[in-house]
């Protein structure tokens, strides 16, 4: 007698195996999403740390996890598992934030899986990859929103501090103006006395010069707080720069500093207070000179732009660290020795440029040099 095979029982076993495999794949997917949600909840992680964590988690969710590798490219930064291979087939899903594609997530196998005409990846795996890409985009968006919020809060706090300091500076300046005026007046009267001893005359000169210096500081305080308004007239930026250079060229030559000047061949008309714009130029030049105690080069350029004129001053001095660069417009902040700087130079420059509806930007690298860019509205033609 022939024994008949029970094909129905074989089919039941096969179906059970498939169900078990399907269940195992779903468990791996859920574990992957759970692990990603866990690292997303850690607010101390940076965006790069989040993406590196996802790359580490992803391969475990794939069917052939022992051969799977993952890679994330975001804003041209790459995170991948070790020994990322050259691949034949891949799965990829884009990372898009606010409609802008900024990278992708990719999974490959180290070894060829399946046949030439058979896709080694499951449809469920592609859907998982797309879900992970959406979750990654949401995480990054939250992190960037938090960073923007912190940046804005810091800017508001900084603006509030500057406003408070400006009000205090204006009050102090007004209070000092009157006694300084009296000191200068009495010093001038004493200077006119013909029978002063030589030493007394020298001391009065020191009093007079020191009082003038104090008055200049008061004037800077008023400009910083914008309580001192200059008289705006038509002025040529190129002409103001040439005038300023006449006072600085000899000092630069004596300190081994070369000046490269490339001014726009056309007159650069601006509506400005010539004295204040000259003060801006001289202040920036003095800063550049002081940054090059062993000599160097200062490049000065002016350009005409649509509705604007620009001034660029660049030096090859000691430069500044990023930490110092963030504080340069804070009043009374200085890296110079006591008695050399008041910490009002750049804040006053910033106040003057802002009062003229202009923009100032300073870039610097420690040991390389500093570049200052100023843009001012072009002079309006008068009928």
Image: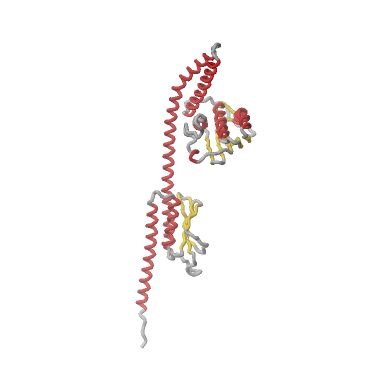
Q: Is residue 89 something that shows in the picture? A: yes
- Residue 62 vs 366, above or below: the answer is below
| 215 and 198: which is toward the camera | 198
Q: Nearer the viewer, residue 194 or 57?
A: 194
From the viewer's side, name the closer residue of 281 and 20.
281
Name the residue furthest right: 265
Above or below residue 33? Residue 333 is above
Which residue is at 56% across, 39% downward? 369
Instruction: Give percent across and percent down for residue 305.
Output: 58, 37
Which x, y percent locates residue 131?
42, 57
Compared with 288, 198 (above or below) is: above
**Quadrant for the C terminus in the image:** top right
Say which quadrant the N terminus sits in: bottom left
Residue 266 at what x, y percent from top left?
Answer: 63, 33
Identify which residue, 115 or 208, lies in the foreground. 208
Q: Which residue is located at x 37 percent, y 75 percent?
A: 11
> Residue at horizontal 48%, vertical 20%?
180
Any part of residue 271 in sight? no
Count of number-bearing discs: 0
Name the outermost residue toward the top. Answer: 195
> According to the image, what is the colour scheme of the structure?
secondary structure
Please provide percent x and percent y for residue 358.
52, 33
């Amino acid at each position: 007698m022939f024994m008949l095979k029970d094909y129905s029982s074989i089919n039941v076993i096969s179906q059970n195996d498939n169900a078990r495999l399907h269940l195992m794949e779903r468990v791996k997917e859920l574990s992957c999403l759970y692990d990603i949600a866990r690292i997303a909840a850690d607010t101390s992680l940076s965006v790069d740390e989040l993406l590196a964590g996802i790359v580490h988690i992803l391969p475990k969710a794939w069917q052939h996890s022992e051969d799977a590798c993952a890679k994330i490219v975001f804003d041209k930064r790459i995170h991948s598992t070790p020994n990322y291979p050259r691949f034949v087939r891949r799965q990829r899903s884009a990372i898009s934030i606010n409609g802008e594609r900024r990278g992708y997530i990719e999974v490959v196998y180290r070894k060829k899986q399946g046949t030439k005409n058979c896709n080694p990846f499951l449809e469920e795996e592609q859907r998982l990859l797309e879900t992970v890409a959406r979750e990654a985009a949401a995480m990054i968006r939250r992190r960037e929103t938090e960073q923007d919020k912190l940046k804005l809060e810091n800017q508001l706090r900084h603006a509030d501090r500057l406003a408070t300091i400006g009000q205090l500076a204006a009050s102090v300046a007004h209070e000092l103006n009157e006694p300084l005026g009296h000191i200068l007046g009495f010093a001038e009267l004493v200077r006119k006395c013909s029978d002063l001893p030589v030493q007394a005359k020298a001391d009065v000169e020191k009093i007079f010069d020191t009082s003038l210096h104090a008055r200049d500081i008061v004037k800077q305080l008023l400009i910083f707080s914008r309580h001192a308004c200059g008289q705006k007239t038509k002025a040529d930026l190129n002409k103001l720069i040439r005038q300023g250079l006449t006072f600085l060229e000899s000092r630069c030559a004596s300190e081994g500093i070369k000046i490269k000047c490339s001014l726009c061949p056309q007159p650069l008309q601006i509506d400005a207070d010539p004295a204040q714009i000259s003060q801006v130029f001289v202040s920036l030049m003095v800063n550049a000179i002081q940054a090059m105690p062993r000599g160097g080069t200062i490049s000065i350029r002016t350009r005409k732009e649509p509705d604007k004129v620009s001034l660029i001053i660049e030096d090859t001095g000691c430069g500044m660290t990023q930490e110092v660069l963030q504080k340069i417009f804070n009043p009374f902040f200085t890296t110079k020795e006591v008695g050399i700087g008041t910490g009002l130079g750049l804040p006053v420059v910033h106040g003057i440029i802002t009062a003229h509806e202009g923009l100032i930007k300073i870039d610097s690298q420690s040991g390389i040099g500093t570049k200052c860019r100023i843009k001012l509205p072009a002079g309006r033609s008068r009928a």
